[in-house]
Image: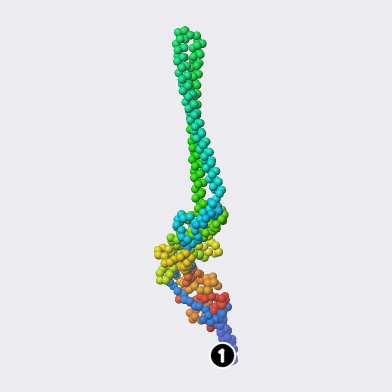
Amino acid sequence: MDKVITPKKGIKKKHIYWLLGAVLLGFLVYQLVWGNSGSSMRIAKEKVTVSDVTDGMFQDYINITGKVEPIRSLYLDAIEGGRVEELMLEEGVMLEAGQVILKLENNMLYQTILNSETELAQKENFLRDTRIRFANDLIESRRNMLNSEYQLSRSKRNYDQQLRLFEQKLVPKEDYLKAEEDYNYQKNLLEINRQKAENDSLINSSAIQDLNRDLIKMRQTLKLVHDRLGNLEIKSPISGQLGMLDAELGQSIGQGARIGIVHDLSDYKVSAQIDEHYIDRVVRELSANFKRGQQDYDLMVRKVYPEVRDGQFQIDMIFQAEKPERIRAGQTYHMKLELGAARQAVMIPRGGFFNSTGGQWIYVLDKSGERASKRPIKIGRQNGKYYEVVEGLLPQEQVITSSYELLGDHDQIIFN
C-alpha cells in the first residue's frame, strides 16, 4: 500500500531564481523606458540660459543700420575735354543751379569751329553763285522762247501767204513747200525751247532746294559746334553742395571724365545694407522706423538695389513725414525694417544656440527642470528678439537658448 507524501511549505530554491529574474527584467524595462539610453552631460544650471516658450504676436522685422545721404547726387562729367584754365569754387561750397564751377580750354575745338565757319562761308558763296547762274539761265531761256515765238509768228504769216498764192497758182510749188517747212521747223523749235525751259526750271529749283537744305544743316552743325564752347564751362546742374572736385589748374581732362559731384540737400534719404538672406522679402514700400530721443520717425523703402556684394544688398529709404532736427549727411540710425504684418506664433528668445544647431534642434527641459533632452524643431521667421517656432515646441515649455559650445552634442543635459 502506497504512502501519501505531504509537500513541504516555504520558499524553495526555484522561487528565488524566479524572483531574481523578475527584478532583473524590471530593471531592464526601467532603463529602457526611464533610463538614459544615449550620451549625457552634467552641468550647473547657472552656466546656461533657460528661456520660456511663449505664445504671442510675432513682429516680423529686422534690425538694420542706416546711413543718411542726400536725396540725390549728380555727377559732373566733362562733356568736352580740355585743360583746366580756371577754378571758380572749392569742395563743400553751396551752389546755385547753373553756377560755373571751373573753365576748360580746348584749342582743337576752336580750330573745329573756325573750319566749320569757313566751310559754311564757302557753301553760302557757292549757293549765291548758283542762284545767279540759274537766274541768267532763266533769262536766256525766256529770250529763246521769245525769239522762237517771234520766228514762228513770221513763218506762219509767210506760210499762210504762200498757201493762198499757191492755191491761185501765182507762186511755184517750191516756194510754198519752203514756207511750210520753215513754219513747221519754227513750231517744233518753239516746243523744244518750251520743254527745255521747263526742265531747266525744275532742275534749277531742285538744285536750289538741295543747296538750301545743305546750308541749313551746315548752320545747324555750326550752332552745335558753337554750343560745345559752352560745355567748356562746367556748371552745377542743380542747387546743392559741391562734393568731390577732382581737378587742378593746368590739368588735362579727357572727354567724359568724371570731375566732381553735387549733392541735392533739399531732402535726405537713408541707405542701408541688408543680408542677402532677406533679398526675396525686401521690396519697395516696406515700412521702417527708429526712435531718436522721445520722437518716432517713419520711413518707406523707395529703392531696392538688385546687386549683391559681399553677401549684402542695398536699399534706399525716404522719410514719410517729419525728419529729425539738425539731420546731416553721414549720420547713422539704428532702425527696424518691417517685413510683414504681425501674427500669432510660438516664440523663443534669440540666443547663441542657433549658431550651433542652425535652428534644427534645441535642448528642452522636462517638467522637473532637472534635465534637458534634444528635440528637433523648425524655425520660421526671426526678428531682433525672437525666433518663430513652426514645429517642435509648445507654449510654457522651457528651453536652453544660450550657446551650446560647452554642451557639445549630447542627447541629454543633467543639471547638478
Q: Is residue 280 above or below residue 230?
A: below
Q: Is residue 35 left or right of residue 154?
A: right
Q: Is residue 135 above or below residue 262?
A: above
Foreground: 275 or 57?
Answer: 275
Q: Position of residue 179 (x, y in %)?
A: 49, 14
The residue shown at (49%, 81%) is 368
Q: Residue furthest top?
A: 169
The mark tally for this picture is 1
Q: Position of residue 281 (x, y in %)?
A: 48, 63
User: From where the camera sits, is residue 243 visible?
Assistant: no
Q: Position of residue 341 (x, y in %)?
A: 43, 66
Residue assigned mark 1: 11
Three-letter residue code for mark 1: Ile
Give neighbour class at mark 1: few <14, some 14-19, many 20+ (Cα, 10 Å): few
Foreground: 121 or 137?
Answer: 121
Foreground: 371 or 54?
Answer: 54
The residue shown at (50%, 11%) is 175
Q: Secondary structure at mark 1?
A: loop
The residue shown at (50%, 38%) is 124
Q: Position of residue 11 (x, y in %)?
A: 56, 90
The residue shown at (54%, 55%) is 84
